[in-house]
Amino acid sequence: MSTIFNTILNNFLLIGGTLIGVGFIQNGFFWKFINVKLSAGKNILVKIKEIQRQYYRVGTIIEGDLVYKLTKKDIKRINIPKNNTVIYKSLGIDFIDVDGITNAINTVDYTGVSGFDSVKMNDLFVRALTKPKLDDTEKIIVLVLLGIILIAVGIVIFNILDQSQQIEFIKNQLGTMQGNVVGGSKI
């Protein structure tokens, strides 16, 4: 039994080590490719080209904008032009090229498409999306309180009905016992 376990463990270690090694050698491309491939077209692979290197990030298209995370906190948002073709297929997934220095989307013939400050636009989008909504919170509080009151009323009604059934049962038991008792002795 231990030889079977050792064989299975060795195979898992070999496969896992190979996958980790491939991910390390390809500078993270492999795992991002798998993420985009498994998203079934929801995500897009962003190839960011700089002077000395190129690297990959997973992005999505939201309302005509390409949105991807450069780091955990640095989110980039670039407008995709409607008249230019910038998305192309390769390896069975969608790719888009971005110039990392000018923060512009490259078209298929490698001309840049820009025209606005993405950092400023991203700040405006974040500010608009995190705007407080006072009316919604008040409605939620009222609905939660109404739900709690309805649950409490339901529990009280259930307890009252249950107690009335118990009282009827006790009355019936006392009535049958009263008919069986004559002169203090049970017949």
Image: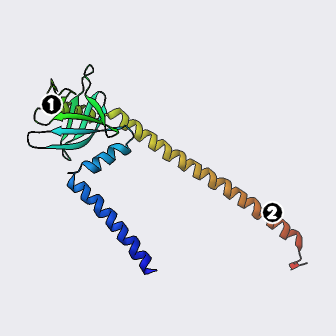
The answer to whether 152 is drawn above or below residue 77 in the figure is below
Residue 38 location, x and y as percent?
A: 38, 45
Helix, strand or loop for disc 1: helix
Relative horizontal placement of residue 143, taking residue 126 as reference (left or right): right
From the image, tell me which residue sits under label 1.
Answer: 120
* Residue 149 picture location, percent across and down: 51, 46
Nearest the viewer among 70 and 143 is: 70
User: Is 19 on the left or on the right of 27, as rendered?
Assistant: right
Residue identified by numbered label 2: 172
Q: Residue at x 17, y 28 (%)?
A: 110
Give the residue type that dot 1 points to.
Lys
State which tag comes first along the sequence, 1 or 2: 1
**Residues packed near mark 1 inside 10 Å, few (<14), some (14 to 19) or many (20 plus):** few
How many dots with numbers?
2
Image position, residue 125 (x, y; %): 23, 31
The quadrant of the rendering that contains the C terminus is bottom right
Q: Nearer the viewer, residue 39 or 67?
A: 39
Which residue: 18% across, 34% down?
98
Q: Image check: 37 left or right of 46?
A: right
**Above or below — where is 92 with respect to 113?**
below
Q: Quadrant of residue 45?
A: top left
Instruction: Determine the image quadrant of residue 171.
Output: bottom right
- CB atoms of marks 1 and 2 within 8 Å: no
SS assignment at label 2:
helix
Most distant residue in the left direction: 51
Residue type of the residue flagged with mark 2: Asn
> Viewer-proximal residue, 78 or 165?
78
